[in-house]
Image (tube, rainbow, N blue to C red):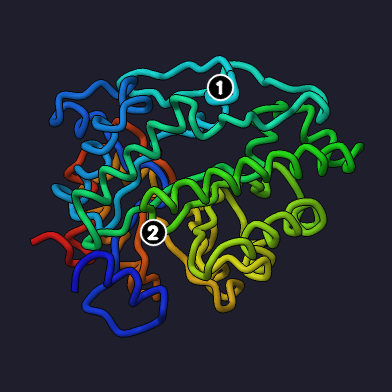
């Protein structure tokens, strides 16, 4: 059973040889970049370099998936946002929002032809050519909530979700077009599934905000695509809204270790979970044994799609990622 077959068996709730180790968001590290002779700042705009970095965890660290989107800025960069492309140990970020009113936004006709977007699509094509159907290729898009946080600004958008919900909804309805278009393009390029990153955590909103403003858009997006297309990713505490995520139709949710494992499992219904090896303590500062034991605890609780809880800090040592792989049995 190869990596892709294993993940498909788990998604279809069939018997397979072992749990799978996936990375719904970035699993790039500075150590991996050094091993490949790459600059992390360069990989976001170069399909060949990004393909090498995306494949490295699969080839060398025991991952069953490949994730070629290493940041949260590609959509914003394609729209003209000013980008800080980071450094060897820092992730890229958007320096300032682009829009203050929904009427200012128009989805460019050439959005898919702009360099940050074409680079990712080229990366996915290269991975499909080189690995065929042996490993799961995961694409990634930002959801309408997260695009609003980035492109309109966190403070004004969150205020509007309370005081001007119609304005907030209009922004998200417009940005949902980016989510759909980019997801379609990545699937056409060869991605098997798409991580939809939408950070509507309890730190930023109430469950009712999700239910009333964002869930209808999630439903519309999901219904446009075949079953088992999306993995929803949301950092932070989401136990109070995870049942709504399941009700929206997501087949898989990528959860954070801030959630109590028993509680979130109980509330997910038929939706499967992937996670949640802790990043800031276990992977970044823990020992190999710490990582191994936490992974085993997740498996004992019934998690069959094991993953780090969020984008891996670039400072994480690869030996700790290999400890996850040894726990699931993907690395001797």
- For image coordinates 39% across by 48% down, the residue present is 189
Q: Residue furthest front?
A: 109
Give the label, 2 or 1, closer to the camera. 2
Quadrant into which the C terminus falls: bottom left
Q: Residue furthest left?
A: 332
In this picture, is 246 found above or below 145? Answer: below
Task: Name the side, left or right, on which 332 lies relative to 91.
Answer: left
Q: Do we see residue 68 in this rendering?
A: yes
Disc with the residue nearer the chain's start (2 vs 1): 1
Query: Residue 102's spot in the image, x, y percent?
Result: 81, 30
Query: Residue 269's spot in the image, x, y percent?
Result: 59, 77
Work out whether residue 317 or residue 254 is closer to the camera in this orientation and state it. Answer: 254
- For image coordinates 36% across by 56% down, the residue present is 307
Q: Secondary structure at mark 2?
A: loop
Marks 2 and 1 sit apart, C-alpha to C-alpha, by: 28 Å
- For image coordinates 68% across by 49% down, the residue present is 202
Q: Residue furthest bottom?
A: 15
The disc placed on residue 209 is none
The disc placed on residue 94 is 1
Task: Name the side, left or right, on which 299 lies relative to 160.
Answer: left
| Quadrant of res 179 | top right
Q: Secondary structure at mark 1?
A: strand
- For image coordinates 69% across by 39% down, the residue present is 175
Q: Do we see residue 309 in this rendering?
A: no
Query: Residue 174's spot in the image, x, y percent?
Result: 74, 40
Around disc 2, counting alpha carbons within 10 Å, would you say few (fewer than 14), some (14 to 19), or many (20 or more)?
many
Task: Name the side, left or right, on which 158 lies relative to 202.
Answer: right
In this picture, is 166 found above or below 4? Answer: above
Work out whether residue 149 or residue 108 is closer to the camera in this orientation and state it. Answer: 108
| Residue marked by disc 2 | 192
In this picture, is 93 found above or below 53? Answer: above
């Amino acid at each position: 059973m190869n990596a892709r077959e294993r993940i498909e068996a788990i998604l279809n709730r069939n018997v397979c040889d072992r749990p799978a180790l996936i990375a719904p968001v970035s699993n790039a590290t500075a150590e991996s970049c050094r091993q490949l002779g790459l600059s992390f700042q360069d990989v976001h705009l170069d399909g060949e370099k990004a393909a090498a970095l995306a494949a490295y965890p699969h080839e060398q660290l025991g991952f069953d998936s490949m994730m070629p989107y290493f940041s949260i800025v590609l959509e914003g960069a394609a729209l003209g946002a000013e980008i800080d492309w980071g450094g060897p140990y820092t992730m890229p970020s958007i320096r300032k929002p682009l829009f203050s009113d929904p009427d200012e936004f128009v989805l460019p006709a050439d959005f898919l032809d702009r360099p940050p977007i074409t680079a990712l699509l080229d990366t996915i094509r290269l991975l499909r050519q080189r690995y065929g159907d042996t490993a799961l290729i995961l694409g990634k898009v930002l959801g309408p909530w997260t695009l609003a946080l980035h492109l309109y600004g966190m403070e004004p958008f969150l205020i509007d979700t309370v005081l001007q919900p119609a304005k907030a909804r209009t922004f998200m309805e417009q940005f949902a077009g980016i989510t759909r278009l980019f997801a379609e393009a990545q699937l056409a390029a060869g991605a098997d599934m798409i991580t939809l990153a939408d950070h509507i955590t309890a730190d930023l909103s109430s469950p009712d905000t999700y239910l009333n403003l964002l869930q209808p858009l999630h439903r519309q997006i999901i219904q446009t695509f075949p079953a088992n297309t999306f993995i929803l990713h949301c950092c932070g505490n989401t136990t109070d809204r995870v049942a709504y995520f399941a009700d929206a139709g997501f087949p898989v949710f990528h959860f954070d270790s801030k959630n109590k494992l028993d509680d979130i499992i109980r509330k997910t219904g038929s939706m499967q979970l992937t996670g949640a090896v802790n990043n800031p303590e276990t992977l970044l500062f823990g020992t190999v044994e710490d990582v191994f034991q936490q992974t085993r605890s997740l498996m004992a609780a019934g998690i069959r799609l094991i993953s780090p809880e969020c984008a891996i800090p670039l400072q994480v040592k690869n030996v700790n990622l290999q400890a996850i792989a040894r726990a699931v049995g993907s690395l001797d």
